[in-house]
Amino acid sequence: MPGRIPDDFIESLLERVDIVDVVGSRVALKHAGRGEHKGLCPFHDEKTPSFTVSSAKQFYHCFGCGAHGTAIGFLMAHDGLEFPGAVEELAHIAGLEVPREAGLASSERHDRIYEALAAAQHWFRQQLGGSRAAREYLKSRGFDKATVDEFGIGYAPDQWQGLSDALSGDGFSIVELEKAGLVTRGEHRVVDKFRDRVMFPIHDRRGRVIAFGGRGLGDRGPKYMNSPETPVFHKGRELYRLYQVRRRGLPERILVVEGYMDAAALHQFGFEDAVATLGTSVTRDHLELLFKATPVVVFCFDGDRAGRQAAWRGLETALPLLQSNREIRFFFVPEGEDPDSLVRERGAEHFSQLLDQARPLSAVFFDELCRQVDMNTLDGRARLVALAQPYLERLPEGPFADLLRGELDRLSGHQSATQPARDPIRSRRPPEAGEERPLTPIQYAVALLVQQPGLAQNESVYLLDIPANIKGLNFLRELVDICAQKPHFSTAKLLELWRDRTEAPWLARLAVRPVCSEDEQMSEALAQTMVRIRHQQIQARVRELQEAQLVEGGLDAGQTAELRKLLSLRSETHQD
């Protein structure tokens, strides 16, 4: 894969950094004995520490919400970074340069776009100083210099080619500027995309400028305009100011508004946890990003019909993501107002009081459905059940879904229709961390090896080289081979090898599963378990041969000799 970060570099990087230092710089940790550290989980609200970080395993785990992972995974979850960004952040801590395999990574292919956007941001900032009209407009909207500087607000002059001429002089080609969304091709010439607009830079999760939003000062064109979709900007995947909010840590809540002017005004009045959508409805990507940063999301919509329709679309998008540790509320601004005007006219204290009255998703959900039926009749309540059920089926199983069904029971007076249909696949899920469901011998061996990869060097840890149809056997064989080759691996480095494979979540759960009362017992426990697994191999192969003997009317000479050998070996292993 072109531009891929080599596996051996990731291994070396995880050796150079200590997860305790990485997590400890963001979470207050205390020693809990034998290389363990404890603290309050940064991913959910708790009063008693259930968040642990293991120096030996180089792994973190929360026994409260189940969050777990390596130093790379922690940076992805806590700082909102993508995998390459998390690796680069760790490399920076370790003082290393991230190498790339042959070819260009997508970020490297887009370097010129990022550079063009950064240059444009610098130029827009310079132009603001020379535009009295732009400065007067910002002053009239109540923005002070500190807010203008904090938001990096600039100005695009009323010129057809002002930016393109300036950046062309800096060595950027028209093709590069067009790819960055800064210019557009007319019938006879190339012209600047933004003209006579106050400019707001939009950043990605690594703090790079990826687009702009412009508020027009004149009457030409739309009042607000965003950059077009480009190779580095997809408005359905980005939230204005999320980078700045995440940079300050994980907030207790995030307020989502509809425009960057609203976000800037709220920031100036002390609401520093405000982000904005970028001219699009709330998407699943938006919600995933938000819930990585906070457990509580408050959506701010206009109180008119369009605002309530937008809120319902957001509610529908959110339903499949609503786990018990996530909460969505809706704050409807009085008609004729927006967050900008409301906070300036009524003040921060009044705005905060209104925010505290934001309605939970459950209330908005039932209010809207009850509005569509006559709740005073049996017919209307029956229709309420019919309307609600398709939405409830989208919810993941858990306390929130159960409570919503219970509320529907109460409102309709009809309990049987709200019982969820069981998903046969979901009911056969693998054991979650902390559950006491017994492990099979193969699962137990995997858990031991994940927690102490060096155990594979013991001469008692091997599998028989015979075919046997046993679930998980091939995976265990692969794991034993890798651990034997890399006995110095920590749990973290082992898990990083499986990051992109389907077994990764299962391995992470086994990494924190209690397996022995004392670490010193793990070697003997694994040796005994491998004896049982080798016996299972023999048993399974004997059954296969005996079934073939019955079905096919006999075995050939080679199969007969194999069966005799296995029966003798089974007797020996049973005596052991």
Image: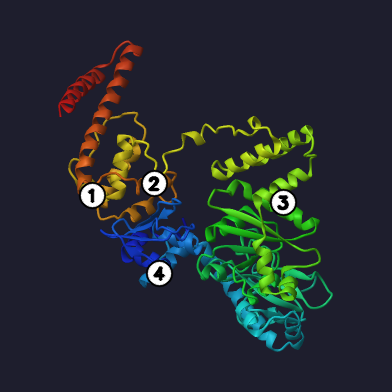
Earlier in the chain: of badge 3 and badge 1, it is: 3
- Residue type, numbered disc 4: Ser
Write down the residue under mark 3: 312
Taking depth in this image into account, of 532 and 553 the one nearest to the observer is: 532
Write down the residue under mark 4: 25
The quarter of the displayed image where residue 279 is located: bottom right
Residue at (80, 39) in percent of width and height: 374
Q: CA distance from mark 4 to mark 2?
A: 25 Å
Earlier in the chain: of badge 3 and badge 2, it is: 3
The quarter of the displayed image where residue 409 is located: top right
Write down the residue under mark 1: 519
Q: Which mark is residue 141?
A: none
- Name the secondary structure under disc 1: helix
Write down the residue under mark 2: 509
- Residue type, numbered disc 1: Asp
Seen in the picture, residue 90 relative to 236 is either above or below; the reply is below
Q: CA distance from mark 4 to mark 3?
A: 40 Å
Taking depth in this image into account, of 324 and 554 the one nearest to the observer is: 324
**Residue 390 in view (yes/no):** no
Residue at (79, 71) in percent of width and height: 223
Label 2 neighbour load within 10 Å: few <14, some 14-19, many 20+: many
Earlier in the chain: of badge 4 and badge 1, it is: 4
Residue at (35, 40) in percent of width and height: 475
- Residue type, numbered disc 3: Trp
Q: CA distance from mark 3 to mark 1?
A: 53 Å
Earlier in the chain: of badge 4 and badge 3, it is: 4
